[in-house]
Amino acid sequence: MYLTTNVLADIRKDLELHLGEKVWLKANRGRRKAMVREGVIESTYPYHFLVRMGDAHNYSRISISYADVLTQSVELAIGAPEHKLTAELGK
């Protein structure tokens, strides 16, 4: 349990360094369906972070837990789609 907590804290610290930056999200929605969206990391909280999608006048926010990033239910790419953020166990 302690190892997982450290990994989740590391994910949060990494995301805090990229507040306000563009991010690409890929979320599996089941049965061969995936959502791929572009947004901006807006803020981080102890158990989740917010991503704002859309323009300045018409936007929505989604909340993503750090555990979703750890289990790769949600894949993140910061800046460009080829720069994936991956959580490595054991570090």
Image (spheres, grey):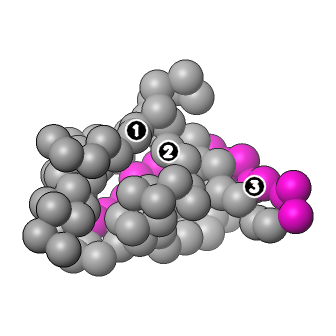
| 17 left or right, relative to 55 | left
Asked if labels 2 and 1 touch by Cβ distance under 8 angstroms, the answer is yes
Instruction: Name the amino acid, label 1.
Output: Leu
Residue 45 location (% of width, % of height): 25, 73
Instruction: Name the amino acid, label 2.
Output: Leu
Quadrant of the image containing the N terminus: bottom left
State whether residue 83 is above or below residue 62.
Answer: above
Query: Circle 3 is placed at which residue position?
Result: 35
| 6 left or right, relative to 85 | left
Residue drawn at (35%, 72%) of the image: 48
Label 3 packing within 10 angstroms: few (<14), some (14-19), many (20+): few
Q: Earlier in the sequence, mark 3 or mark 2?
A: 3
- The secondary element bearing badge 1 is classed as strand
Q: Earlier in the sequence, mark 1 or mark 2?
A: 2
Q: Nearer the viewer, residue 72 or 80?
A: 72
In three-dimensional space, the C-alpha distance between marks 3 and 2, rounded to whole angstroms, equals 12 Å
In three-dimensional space, the C-alpha distance between marks 1 and 2, rounded to whole angstroms, equals 5 Å
- The secondary element bearing badge 3 is classed as strand
Query: Circle 1 is placed at which residue position?
Result: 85
